[in-house]
Amino acid sequence: MPVTAATDLGFRRLLAAAGQAPSVHNTQPWRLRAVRDRVARGHAVELLADRDRRLRVADPRGRSLHVSCGAALFNLRLAVSVAGRRPLVRLAPGEPETPDLLAVVRPGEAVPATEAERELYAAIGRRRTNREPFADRPLPPWVLADLRIAASREGAFLVVPGRHGGGELLECVAIAEDELARDRDYLAELRAWTMRGARHDGLPAHVLGPRPAGEPAPVRDFGRHPDRPPVPFEARPHLAVLTTPGDRPVDWLRAGQALQRVLLVATAHGVSASFLNQPLDLRDLRRHTDPRHRRGHPQMIIRLGYGPEVPRAPRRPPAELAANGT
């Protein structure tokens, strides 16, 4: 099927693919614009930051916004690939004359999509953030290897701590959660994106999962659990940390692309995922930066495992994601 920006239908399909990416608190802070491209003599797509959706308390640097937009960019690349064109990507965050422009995707030469690309594209609609208890079942080493390879293909690293390291990481998450629970501005911003009613964005109650019965919890407790009692979660959660060599806007965009590739590969393997980013939120809220580590700068903390089927978080209509073209 044709998926290009040259027609209204093709552009809507690009919007739909990009719009299904994960984002911090499901803010979906991106827009796409179809533009005439003089170099390619056709249409290109610009990925723009929707800064009205930035978390101004939790994300003062815009790191989470860029990671979220990077995930949408990966979906956009896949949509161009399955249309039979090679996506040519230019990352452009922070250019003074175009502050909201993050990336430009141009359709390159005609190249048939690979089986792997088609498989990942098919997984876009099946991917979910799963905050339910996972089975106490280990991830096979070959699955973890595939996830590491997926991150490395986007210039990132997926660090999987051992049993002792995973326990320490979970304790860090709990400590950060306690710190954040005392910040009124942070909690007010969190409440603004978690709600009972249905919208096109944010986190409604039906996607938040149950309250964990034990501590430290391997799932984020958003405090919205209508009619659901606390339940036990897996005793030894599988955690992974996505890192990048640098910690600049371009690195955050690469982290988002790596994150989405990892999540789609996980989905293809039947593996669920959720996030425990409270330590990163606390770091960003305090405007701290990490010293350079040999394994890179942490950008996402991911919980992996085998979970039940869960509903999808709401999505903005594709037409709402389109910016005016030129």
Image (cartoon, grey):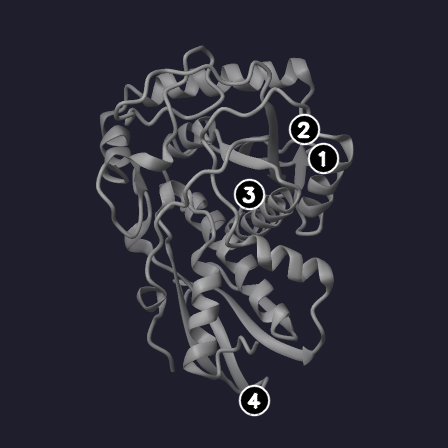
Q: Nearer the viewer, mark 3 or mark 1?
A: 1
| Amino acid type of the residue tagged 3 in the rendering | Asp
Q: Earlier in the sequence, mark 3 or mark 1?
A: 1
Q: Quadrant of residue 207?
A: top left
- Relative to 13, is 82 on the left or the right? right
Residue 81: x and y in percent read 63, 69
Q: Earlier in the sequence, mark 2 or mark 1?
A: 1
| Amino acid type of the residue tagged 2 in the rendering | Val
For label 1, the residue is: 144
Q: Is disc 3 in contact with disc 1, using a CB cutoff of under 8 Å?
A: no
At mark 3, the secondary structure is loop
Q: Nearer the viewer, mark 3 or mark 4?
A: 4
At mark 1, the secondary structure is helix
Q: Which mark is residue 41?
A: 4
Q: Residue 218, relative to residue 326: is it above or below?
A: above
Q: Is disc 2 in contact with disc 4, using a CB cutoff of under 8 Å?
A: no
| Amino acid type of the residue tagged 4 in the rendering | Arg
Q: Is disc 2 in contact with disc 1, using a CB cutoff of under 8 Å?
A: yes
Residue 182: x and y in percent read 28, 19
Q: Residue 256, relative to residue 164: is it above or below?
A: below
For label 3, the residue is: 247
Counting other residues with Cα less than 10 Å from the Cα at mark 4, is it few (<14), some (14-19), or many (20 or more)?
Answer: few
Q: Nearer the viewer, mark 2 or mark 4?
A: 2
Q: How many marks?
A: 4
Q: Earlier in the sequence, mark 3 or mark 4?
A: 4
| Amino acid type of the residue tagged 1 in the rendering | Leu
At mark 4, the secondary structure is loop
Q: Quadrant of residue 169?
A: top right
Which quarter of the image is occupied by the N terminus?
bottom right
Counting other residues with Cα less than 10 Å from the Cα at mark 2, is it few (<14), some (14-19), or many (20 or more)?
Answer: some
Q: Residue at x 46, y 14 (%)?
A: 232
